[in-house]
Image (spheres, grey):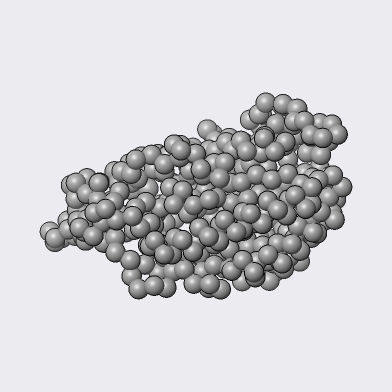
Amino acid sequence: MATALTVVACVDATSPPAERAGPDRALSPDTLQIAGGSADVWLKDFVSMGTSISMGYASEGVWSGSQSAAWPAQLSAMAGYSMSLPLIAFPGCRSPFMAPLALGIRESGEPVTTPDNLLSCALNEPGVSLPTANVAVNAARTIHALTTTPENTTDAGNKGLYARVLPPNTTQVMAMQLQRPALVSVEFGANEILGVRSGAVIPGVTYVPFPAWRPIYDEVTAKARLASSGGGVLVGLIADAGEFPAFRTGAEFWADRVMLLAAFHVQVDANCDQNTDLQLVPVKIPTAVANGLARRNLQLPPYPLSCAPGPRGTQDLVLDAGERRIVEGLLREMNAYIKRRAAQLGWAYFELEALYGLPNLKPPFSSLALMQSMTPYGNYISLDGFHP
């Protein structure tokens, strides 16, 4: 079972609806062997808690096609079951980005610059009865599994999403308990760190320190163990923030400087040459391209693209060497603890590193491919640079 869980298959959530993977696209019904028998019985009553990764969030949005391709649904299908899902009608809640990114719109037709709290949110598909077996919610931190309901969420950008996944006055943990699962998966921790992608690495502000997170994680996993009649799996994180295709080094921008200037009227600054700091591609490059093309139309000089970090603690869209060490130290500490906790519970364990650590995950950086191809971040990662 642990081996099977390391297989993560991914789809691009931006192809036409008729071509997307759905619940009627069956996977091979292999029998997964576990101690004491096959996993078939356990996976019949499998409940998944977690974040965007378990939910099937992709290309900065979610709908039934991407939900059906999430790893918990695929694992269930491998054992011959169709996992019940809180399927959201097309074009989603929020709607995914449309490829190519140069279009600057979502599948719904809304501009990508629309504030999150103003984006449309489609209803569940007919026949969905909440809670379903997948109760994971985008942007959830571990504490939210214990405390957040559709009524009390303070996340304006995901408020509609909570109502599509959880019944009224119900948290993820409560929804899991209601279903009396035989098997539970717990995938939390990534959102405690992802705030640092802005370039600001501030404890208690953009990331949750390990001592504050650990007791909350203990409580969530203890409740899952108590509710589960069979067993469970804890999901670890990645090993290095630089593995996300959404991050590139300044040196990679420098290597693409001729194309950035010729195609988009963007002048890469010399401070990018041999620069190893991590740059947030989904914001820095589209912003530079939009400004560069606007300046070209006005016959103005090229837009300057700098790779230099700002003062420590600012949202400069750059992770310098010191900030990166802090983030990677936290990732190591959390991963080690999640693995230790799985051993304490007698549960299985795997890491998202199974996908994000693939040596061929990132294609060579190309601003032209980023803006104009259908797979700007490669074949495994969706149009936001972070999600499968």
Report if residue 198 is visible in the image: no
Q: Nearer the viewer, residue 330 or 375?
A: 330
Height in image: 211 above or below 75?
Answer: below
Q: Residue at x 40, y 69 (%)?
A: 315
Height in image: 300 above or below 106?
Answer: below
**Horizontal and vertical percent for residue 356?**
51, 44
Seen in the image, is 80 located left or right of residue 264? right
Could you tell me which quadrant the N terminus lies in?
A: top right
Q: Quadrant of residue 337?
A: bottom right
**Horizontal and vertical percent for residue 388?**
53, 44
Q: Residue at x 79, y 34 (%)?
A: 34
Q: Residue at x 62, y 54 (%)?
A: 335
Seen in the image, is 312 located left or right of residue 138? left
Seen in the image, is 43 located left or right of residue 113? right
Q: Residue at x 61, y 66 (%)?
A: 210
**Horizontal and vertical percent for residue 164?**
67, 56
Height in image: 179 above or below 216?
Answer: above
Q: Nearer the viewer, residue 338 or 74?
A: 338
Q: Quadrant of residue 376?
A: top left
